[in-house]
Image (cartoon, rainbow, N blue to C red):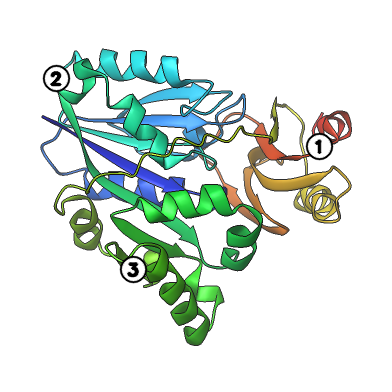
Amino acid sequence: MVKFDIVSGFLGAGKTTFIKKVLESLDNQEEKLVLIENEFGDVNVDREFLKVSGFEVYELSNGCVCCKLKGDFLLTLKHILSQKVDRIIFEPSGIFILSEIVDLFKDFEISSKCYINTVTTIVDAENFSKHIQSYSYFFRNQISNASTLILSKTQFLQTEDIDVIKETLHGLNEKAVILTKNWTDLSPQEILDIIEKEPAGTINGDSTTLGHDFETLGIRTSIILEVNQLKSILEKCKAGRYGTILRGKGIINSGNKFLEFQYVDGHYTISESNDHLVGIVSFIGKNLEKQTLKEAFQ
């Protein structure tokens, strides 16, 4: 039977960063591994961030597999399972309703060949209070159905604040293992222990399905921006000039190198990279000023 590992988490929690650590940890394992990436936007920036060779990646973009792309996901999964595969790692979109996976596994062609092994939910500790209040349904659903909960960005919080979050998480999911250690310090063996534990319990189905009222904008661009120019755009995002942006990410040419940026609820980081050859950006939010935002990157 093929292992199906889910790495869930709300927008900007750090799913892709964690998956890269998983892939690096599995690099020496004798497993045939396939990764399925679900990007809610119409361009897949995460595919560019995952620069770990040797793994096959399937992309499902411009929607969520729990609703709009459910049929595409089933076809993709069946195609993968027709091959020789040992493990599938699935990164759903940040607004994936985790309980919807129950319906996907009702298909006998899938359930007879594949089982849900682990469900790891990455929890953004820095934005925990805001997310659990403003996006409670998605957030709580992903937390309550996890077999392991991993807090990201704990380096920005005090110990007592982390303890409060941990207590809240335990109230939402008393069975899950909760890891609060700064995950940049997790060893390859600790990463492997997370996905090699006992198979996850039953995911709770939910007859209530909420629509996704989020907007997206994806852009492939050849624009050249210096660091200060990119910062200026992200500061405008922060000020609400382009609407309410919850999540932004991208790769931008700055002339002699490329810049990677991550934007989550008013917080952003910019780092240098020489590994990319394309300019690509993606934004998710509400009431987006799409034309104005598009012009900023073109």
Looking at the image, tell me whether mark 1 or mark 2 is earlier in sequence order.
Answer: 2
Circle 1 is placed at which residue position?
A: 288
Q: How dense is the environment of label 3, judged by Cα within 10 Å: few (below 14), some, or many (20 and up)?
A: some
- Tell me which residue sits at (30%, 47%) in the image: 119
Tell me the residue that label 2 is attached to: 84
| Cα distance between the residues tagged 3 and 2 | 33 Å
Q: Which of 291/133 is in front? A: 133
Residue at x 42%, y 55% (from the top left corner): 143
Residue type, mark 3 in image: Leu
As displayed, is residue 57 above or below residue 237?
above
Q: CA distance from mark 1 to mark 2?
A: 43 Å
Q: Position of residue 30 (x, y in %)?
A: 10, 37
Classify mark 2: helix, strand or loop. loop
Q: Secondary structure at mark 1?
A: loop
Q: Quadrant of the N terminus?
A: top left
Locate the C terminus by quadrant: top right
Quadrant in the picture for residue 107:
top left
* Residue 179, disc: 3
Distance from Cα at disc 1 to Cα at disc 3: 35 Å
- Kind of residue at badge 2: Lys
Regarding residue 149, the answer to whether it shows in the image is yes
* Residue at the farthest bottom position: 160
